[in-house]
Amino acid sequence: MINLKGIKKSFNKSEVLKGINLKIEKGEVVTILGPSGSGKTTLLRCLNFLEKPDGGMVQIGNIKVDTEKATKKEMLTIRKQSAMVFQHYNLFAHKTVLQNVMEGLIVAKRVKKKDARYRSELVLEKVGLKDKLHHYPSQLSGGQQQRVGIARALALNPEVILFDEPTSALDPELVGEVLSVIKTIAKEGITMVVVTHEMSFAREVSDRVLFMDGGVIVEEGTPLEIFHAPKEERTRRFLQRISGDSFFPPLKERVN
Amino acid sequence: MTIDIPFIWTAFKEIIKSLPITLILTLVPLAIGFLIGLTVALVRIYKTRFLYQAANGYVSFFRGTPIIMHIMVIYYGIPLLIDQVSSKFDLNIQTNKIPIILFVLIALSLAAGAYLSEIIRSGIISVSTGQLEAAYSVGMTKYQAMFRIVLPQALALSIPNFTNLFVGFLHTSSIAFLVSEKELTGAANIVASTNLKFLEAFIAAGIVYWGLTIMVEGISFLLEKKVTSYSRGGVS
């Protein structure tokens, strides 16, 4: 379904991705964890050619592209296989909520306006924004904006939705509403790749967790394996650092 | 020397008859300049091969030299060029039959194009790259993303700069009187010298220019309010 072979990417001679191999099955929810600078966001952006990999092969659905020889047309075709939800929402500021969702359908997918509108209203209802159709992004809260971002991706009915730290820019109290929307669509069997720092979310939703560090996938496994029995030292240290409470030994030990 | 206040009104009525010429000399160059500027801005943003250097040179030259010089060079240069070509190929074009206003319009359009290209370019740059990436991520082409997502916002953001240039060109059009084009300043000069009342005539011309500018500012204010309404937040 998604198949990456030997994906490499460097920025100014510093190698960010050192040959990533990854297979993702249809309907699978994969989360990518890792310290900042580990290349997880770059990997995600290489999947839809927002960054053009320096080498390797990308396959999504039936479209297969050799990144070294990728033409503009190939890049566009493979991009249309996926949709992305961004950390900073990146909604089209001059378009209303409804127009934001319809835009890709009408312009890129050439769906008739009436059908696009129908479909857009449907997904907006799913993310709980039916009453905000004609608002501009600037009139919405962060959580609402990100839900529009999710609706925009969902409306395209892509092979895979890529989430790039979808809750990192949100106020803590708004994280929940966005995560619950993502959970709902995860249950519908849509293939998702999620870069996140929300450990409990990763544990609860994903079928598989990847841990990346230094441009390679250090470890992968089910959430149970990664969170409760990590094999690699680097994974263990990262998880310890992330969950602040593990700095403190359990209460019982302290009492004794 | 005394000031003849009632004559200001007389001069005003005479000078305002030249308003259409001033308006033509302002609006036409800005309209043509907009098309030039948009093209040049896109060439410079996308760094199109060969054209890129030409566009840079064009902007550098026309912003780096005074507009009065463009008018003079084109006013004296183009007829010379046409005469040479026409005598070589027996085309029999009479350059003195070409209306002067055409030369002025060409010169002002080229200058406006250079200034507008920089305004449009800065507008494009100020739209966040995130929106461009989002446009790509939903499958838009470079062209679709530019014309549907980036440019509408870039142009809306540029309205204060456009107004600035509009007002500037309204006043710059007065240079045309140097090549005997009878626009507002030219008319004021004629009224002044035939009546020997310079102060009154130029005060009258000043009132016309100022009035026009106030109107332009008002229109710009309303337009800006309307087209950037999307960016004024507030949860409603």
Image: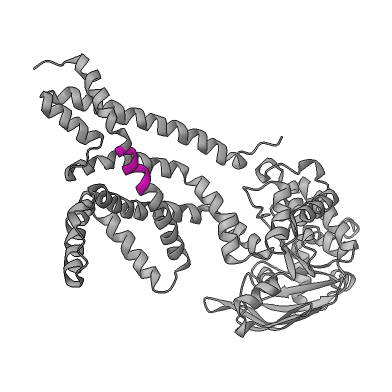
Residue drawn where x is 31% and y is 53% of the image: B111
The one of A6 and A114 positioned closer to us in this rendering? A114
State which quarter of the image contains the C terminus of chain B: top right
Quarter occupied by residue B233 = top right
Residue A78 position by quadrant: bottom right
Residue B5 versus residue A175: which sits nearer the camera?
Answer: B5
Q: Position of residue A230 (x, y in %)?
A: 83, 74
Q: Is residue A95 left or right of residue A24?
A: left
Residue A164: x, y in percent?
71, 63
Above or below B135: residue B183:
above
Q: What is the span of residues highlighted in magenta in the rendered image? A: B21-29
Question: Eyeballing the image, is B26 above or below B18?
Answer: below
Q: Is residue B216 visible?
A: yes
Q: Please say whether residue B26 is one of the residues in the magenta stretch.
A: yes
Q: Along the line of sight, which residue is nearer the eye, A152 or B26?
A: B26
Q: Is residue B177 magenta?
A: no
**Tell me, what colour scheme is on the image?**
one colour
**Residue B34 higher or lower than B81, as above or below:** above
Query: Which residue is most to the left?
Result: B1
> Which SS does the magenta portion mostly show?
helix
Residue A22, percent across and down?
77, 80
Front residue (pair A167, A97): A97
Residue that appears at 21% across and 14% down: B6
Can you say which quadrant of the picture contains the N terminus of chain B? Answer: top left
